[in-house]
Amino acid sequence: MAGTTRIENVRIFDSRAATITEPRDVEIAEGTIRSIGSPGAAPPQDTDPGTVIDGGGRTLIPGLIDAHWHAAFTEIAPGGAMGGDAGYLYASAVVSAGRTLERGFTTVRDLGGPTHGLKRAIDEGIVLGPRIFPSGAFISQSGGHGDFRMPHEVPRGAAGHLSHIELLGVAAIADGEAEVLRASREVLRQGASQLKLMAGGGVASRYDPLDVSQYTVAEMRAAVSAAENWGTYVTAHAYTPRAIRMAVEAGVRCIEHGQLIDEETAELLAANDVWWCLQPFLDDADAIPMSGPSREKQLAMVAGTDRAYELAIAHGIKVAFGTDTLFAPELAARQGAQLAKLTRWYTPAQALQQATFHNAELLRLSGERNPYRGALGVVEEGALADLVLVDGDPLADLSLLARPEEAFAMIMKDGRIIERR
């Protein structure tokens, strides 16, 4: 039998119950958690002694999950992302992926960008990085949140049929049911685990006001139909009640952002069992720097964050944690700080549960398109061995997650020790 890793004397964060156990020993073999037992219990006789780690009473938590990440765009400047050289974009993404893993985020749901090659390189062990649930190119109407074409690329066909961002795999611009259906099928063909649709205006985009709704219900249904035929789902970028309601009517299973929601629309999400991936956007040090019209849209959006969380909690909506950090390495480094910020609305236990067990529930909506077989977001026998050993009690101080370089004694992914301090 292959060598094992045994982590002794650790208190485990039970992400199902959002509690911490008494001390346990954890046995890991072949990328999964083989057994969990009382401290000092004799290991199975057929076990290779392998590596033994003294947990020293620290807290063992599941690897963290970011449900709204853009691996290709997290640390690169906008000009390099949208108009620069593809090699430069991918090189930046490789470095960013390694840093993401070193922060204890062992899985990300990537919601738009050319990450299929990065995912493959990570899965094959060529480079370090988190597990990626890729959306591939996000699907946008002309003039929508995903339309980042340069002025000389409009109208379509002026510089060739496809724009630079489409050729890079950043976006798939599609109008009408037939084009949306084709784009959805092409994105799925390239390996998407879910589809990302732009259903409303955005902050960072130049051409679309925040209040506009994008795509008709029929167009969105075309994407939903394609996703369902492939055994997966559609998630939609939407801020306003109208955009959210149209997406739900079309069969979308998750809403991204939604800071401008009203109570009636929140009730609709709850009644239809729709997930809500909500980010702790505030006008603070973690805000993406904006200017001009984008800054005005940003201020309008963040003004709704507190109300959005209040409505989500009041109506028992399934909430996922994601950061949606873009274009700034200094902000990406605060990925754990963004998670700790959830204590503005939740207990530390609830916040940590959101970034582990609940986010893993959302990932399972990918069904047969799920690229990783095995349980994520839990420390349980048979689960994938994605683990973080925390020097302290995160339920007493969730800000530990914001200081991985000092608070994380070990980071493990797929049974392999990535960092050990």
Image: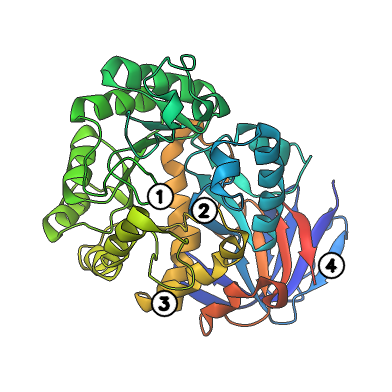
Q: Marks 1 and 2, Cα distance to the nearest angstrom?
A: 10 Å
Q: Amino acid at mark 1?
A: Ala
Residue most extreme to the front:
152
Q: Marks 3 and 2, Cα distance to the nearest angstrom?
A: 23 Å
Q: Amino acid at mark 2?
A: Leu
* Image height of 333 relative to 147, above or below: below
Pointer 2 or 4: first along the chain: 4
Name the residue rendered at 27%, 51% in the picture: 239
Q: Is residue 31 visible?
A: yes
- The location of residue 270, given as percent across then percent down, is 21, 54
Pointer 3 or 4: first along the chain: 4
Q: Amino acid at mark 4?
A: Val
Q: Marks 4 and 1, Cα distance to the nearest angstrom?
A: 48 Å
Label 3 packing within 10 angstroms: few (<14), some (14-19), many (20+): some
Pointer 3 or 2: first along the chain: 2
* Image height of 146 relative to 332, above or below: above
Q: Marks 1 and 3, Cα distance to the nearest angstrom?
A: 27 Å
Q: Amino acid at mark 3?
A: Thr
State the SS at label 2.
loop
Q: Marks 3 and 4, Cα distance to the nearest angstrom?
A: 34 Å
Q: Which mark is residue 52?
A: 4
> Which of these two is toward me, 193 or 415?
193
Q: Which residue is mark 2?
A: 326
Q: Which residue is mark 3?
A: 343
- The location of residue 149, given as percent across then percent down, is 44, 31
The answer to which image quadrant residue 243 occupies is: top left
Residue most extreme to the bottom:
396
Q: Which residue is mark 1?
A: 204
> Closer to us: mark 1 or mark 2?
1
> Which of these two is toward me, 212 or 183?
212
Mark 1 near mark 2, Cβ–Cβ under 8 Å? yes
Pointer 4 or 1: first along the chain: 4
